[in-house]
Every structure is written in C-alpha cells, then in structure tokens.
Image (cartoon, rainbow, N blue to C red):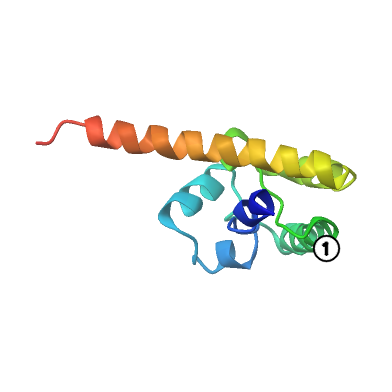
Amino acid sequence: MCKQGILRCFPDLGGRLTQLNMLSKESTMEQRSAELHRLSKEEFDYINAANSKYQTKFNFPFVLCALENKKATIFEELQRRVDNSPNVELHTGIEEAKKICYHRLLNLVQVSLEPKL
C-alpha cells in the first residue's frame, strides 16, 4: 500500500535514532520541541516498547506531529491509538503526516522570505 509506505518513512518518536542524534535536521528540531531528546531511562524504555507494540500491530511506525505535542501527550496518544483498527490508524497516521509536511513547508517558506543581510 502506498499510504503505508509513506508512513514507513518516518522514524520512531523518541527512539534510538533520536537518542543517537541520527535524525534529519527537521526531525531533530521537531522531536526536541516535544522534549523527546531528554527522556529518562524509564521513559525511553516505555516509548521503545510502545513503539514496538504499535509497529507490530500496524506494520508502520507511530506518526504524530511532534511540533503540536509534548512528551506526555505523545505517550498518551501512543497508548490510546494502539487500540485503533488498522483502517482508522492508517487514516490517522496520514493526517498526522500531513501536519508534519505543513509545518516543514511553512518553515521553508519562512526561511526563504527572511531578509539576507
């Protein structure tokens, strides 16, 4: 499925790549805004287990617009959304991906409009 393929391009929120600083510049900024770069060991273990459970059920990573959320909300949504049906979650994940794209495009436009000194 094409939509699932799009969702598979996203990294795990708060996952190993976040902790190793191996995300794109944009993903790093987004996950930092949600405070996912400063997880305690317990939080890191929890989010990795929750991400794994989600990935196993849906066969794509949990996608949520980190710029519009904080760590606690992300944890709550991850726990809540794992109970969704695959169709509902596919739709929800795509809607979240649209939000991420919107914020990234907005950032590109703002950067390109900044005066050059």
Q: Position of residue 91 (x, y in %)?
A: 73, 38
Asked if residue 34 lies left or right of residue 25, the reply is right
Asked if residue 38 lies left or right of residue 42, the reply is left
Q: How many marks?
A: 1
Q: Nearer the viewer, residue 23 or 37?
A: 23
Q: Nearer the viewer, residue 67 or 81?
A: 81
Q: Would residue 72 be seen by someone viewing this image from the given angle?
A: no
- Residue that badge 1 annotates: 56
In the image, what residue occupies the spot 84% across and 47% down? 86
Q: Position of residue 22 (x, y in %)?
A: 49, 67
Q: SS at mark 1?
A: helix
Position above or below: 42 against 97: below
Q: Residue furthest left?
A: 117
Q: Position of residue 8 (x, y in %)?
A: 64, 58
Question: Neighbour class for label 1 at 10 Å: few (<14), some, many (≥20)?
Answer: few
Q: Quadrant of the N terminus?
A: bottom right
Give the quarter of the image for residue 104: top left
Q: Would residue 109 be seen by someone viewing this image from the given angle?
A: yes
Asked if residue 39 lies left or right of residue 57, the reply is left
Q: Position of residue 11 (x, y in %)?
A: 60, 59
Q: Quadrant of the C terminus?
A: top left
Position above or below: 22 against 69: below
Given the image, on which type of amino acid does mark 1 rest? Thr
Position above or below: 81 against 14: above
In the image, what residue occupies the spot 59% across and 55% down? 10
